[in-house]
Amino acid sequence: MSVSIFASQDVQDFLRTVANLDGQDGDARTKQVLHRILSDLFKAIEDLDLTPDEIWAGINYLNKLGQDNEAALLAAGIGLEHYIDMRLDEEDRLAGISGGTPRTIEGPLYVAGAPVTVRSARIDRDPDPDAGPLRIHGVVRGQDGAPLAGALVECWHANSKGFYSHFDPTGAQTEFNLRGTVKTGSDGRYEFLTRMPVGYGCPPQGATQQLLNRLARHGNRPAHVHFFVSGDDHRRLTTQFNIDGDPLLWDDFAFATRDGLVPPVKTGEGGKALGFETETYQDIEFDFDLLPLEAGKDVQAVHRLRAAA
């Protein structure tokens, strides 16, 4: 059914009617966005000569995506979340803003409300014999390069099965396992005592992996640790580092790996004094450099629905 009607006045008028562009009521921004998205969609249907069966297959896919609660996962997998970061990076470049720890995607598995401690937190609340002890520590610095007191470092990561607490399909993890928030002291230092995470894969029967299979792409991530870092008069940083040596280090289906976010993993000694069961442990030192607010505002703050407990 190769027809060409998109440029006709009837179709263009129809698009304006659907978005109610000429109506006085409603939200003008919503109308503008919907009109553009529908226009691009209608044009793609024409250019690609999509059949009714293909269009309805797409609609059915969106239904499954919602049923599986994977929209945020798909946003990472198709590069949408990384593209947002690319745009924010370019905004900074054009504004002459440089430095700071690189940002990267948040992902879909943050949970607000993790307990707050000062300087150090033990966050492996559940035993995990398949994961060795890990110490993550460093300094949060402000715009002047000096240690930033009172900064909040929020941390979350997966267990040795690749599952996150609050999202674990096995139900095995307790609340806020492998999640915590540390408030830095006057020296700007933070520390998390935890277990070494592994990477995870998309649910094999889920909507995201279903699409990735059609693209002949895998849906796996390397081992990584997520962070939000915030401090007075500074932007909140959204970032994560990947665990050096992971075979998927530069083949992340979510496109989160960036230069500057792969710290070395060293062997530490004195683990029993830290509360670990062994003297040796894995040690990752990672400092955070925050950027200042602009005119007193975090103009790049991202507002999205997030889980809370």
Image (spheres, rainbow, N blue to C red):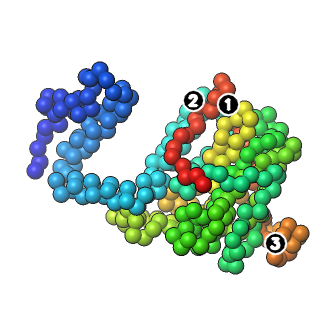
Q: Is residue 4 above or below residue 296?
A: below
Q: Which residue is drawn at 18% across and 57% down?
A: 53
Q: In this view, does 160 lie above or below 90?
A: below
Percent across and percent down for residue 200 are 54, 67
Q: What element carries label 1?
A: loop
User: Mark 3 = which residue?
Assistant: 276
Q: Which residue is drawn at 51% across and 38% down?
A: 87
Using residue 70 as the reference point, say whether residue 39 is left or right of it.
left
Alpha carbon separation for disc pair 2 and 1: 16 Å
Using residue 299 as the reference point, say whether residue 141 is left or right of it.
right
Tell me the amino acid under the disc marked 2.
Leu
Percent across and percent down for residue 176 are 65, 61
User: Mark 1 = which residue?
Assistant: 293
Q: Residue at x 67, y 78 (%)?
A: 130
Farthest bottom residue in view: 129
Percent across and percent down for residue 70 are 43, 58
Q: What element carries label 3?
A: loop
Q: Which residue is drawn at 21% across and 30% down?
A: 17
